[in-house]
Image (cartoon, helix red, strand yellow):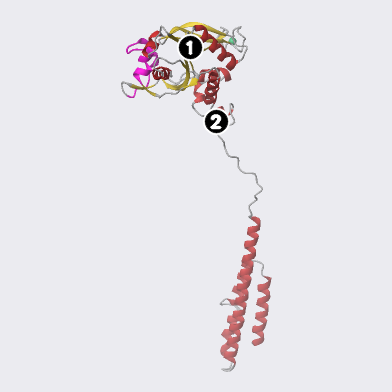
Amino acid sequence: MKEKLQALRAEALTQVEQAETLNDLQQVRVSYLGKKGPITEVLRGMGQLSAEERPVLGELANKVRGEIAEELDRKKQALETAALNEQLKTETIDVTLPGRPVQVGGSHLLSDIVTEIEDLFIGMGFEVREGPEVETDYYNFEALNLPKGHPARDMQDSFYITEDLLLRTHTSPVQARTMGEYKGNKPVKMICPGKVYRRDTDDATHSHQFTQIEGLYVDKNVRMSDLKGVLNQFAKQFFGEEREIRLRPSFFPFTEPSVEMDISCKVCQGKGCSVCKQTGWIEILGGGMVHPSVLEMAGYDPNIYSGFAFGMGPERIAMLKYGVDDIRHFYTNDIRFLQQYHQV
Ligand SMILES: [Zn+2]
């Protein structure tokens, strides 16, 4: 029996050594140390032995079992370590992979247009002024020669916060505020870009919120020819040297006389096409000489001072310059649209 145990021991240890997976090892454990294994079998047969032999053999059987168990554990640990190393080897992070690109934002087409126009007028000596978007009835209408009940107010219906407070319908209040600040004894030469609001139904050319840039020049001896000179300079610098301008009579309550400025159509060179509705001209902005009442209300003596003012919509300018067909593209923030003009 002793020999049998020794043989089992050698056999088991060889199999442990040969096991290649944890599964193999488990099979060895079950077959040698399990309840139906050969060692248990030997222990069961001990009843036939003499009283002297029994403890000796029992001790040997336990020793063999212990040794096999110990070897199984050692091999198990070795296999687990090897498996972990293998896993680490295949799952290493490849630091040479290119990184994921980060989306970098860019300025909006409208912001670019406004900045471009600002730079152009700064170059002609104008300063850039801003004012509140929530404005009083006085600055939005009355100070601009639009008293309560004036029919021209109908064209500029707005969003009222109270009876006297509203979202400004144009940037002209900034002109009235600046003239008020200069107290009637200092020349004013400014442009004011900003957001304005009107109660309009949104469509391809109208929006309840849009952008305006207005300009004002008040000094002694400011004449209509100065207005024409400044606007001509703007048109040529912004749209191209070859563009011609023309002024047509118009009406605005805060200027007298008032004009609309057109530039010659780039598409047909003034011959007439669908873009210019066969006229050869495209309307760009409105302006005129500041109404004496507006000067007077702002504290400037109209007998000493005179001035001109003009206003334009950067959306319309951008639509003309880049051929944008719907004003809503500017506000819906579709990146595919914006990317055409900027690396967004
Ligand atoms: Zn044309």
> Which residue type carries mark 1?
Gly
Mark 1, secondary structure of its residue: strand
Q: Disc number at residue 286?
A: 1
Q: Is residue 207 left or right of residue 147?
A: right
Q: Position of residue 175 (x, y in %)?
A: 42, 17
Quadrant where the image shows the C terminus: top right
Residue segment shown in magenta: 136-161
Is 146 part of what is drawn in magenta?
yes
Residue 63 at x, y percent in the picture: 60, 83
Q: 290 and 31: which one is in front?
A: 290
Contact, CB < 8 Å: mark 2 with mark 1?
no
Asked if 344 appears above or below 41 in the picture, the reply is above
Residue 291 painted magenta: no
- The circle drawn on residue 158 is none
Q: Which mark is residue 335?
A: 2
Residue 1, position in %: x, y?
Answer: 64, 87
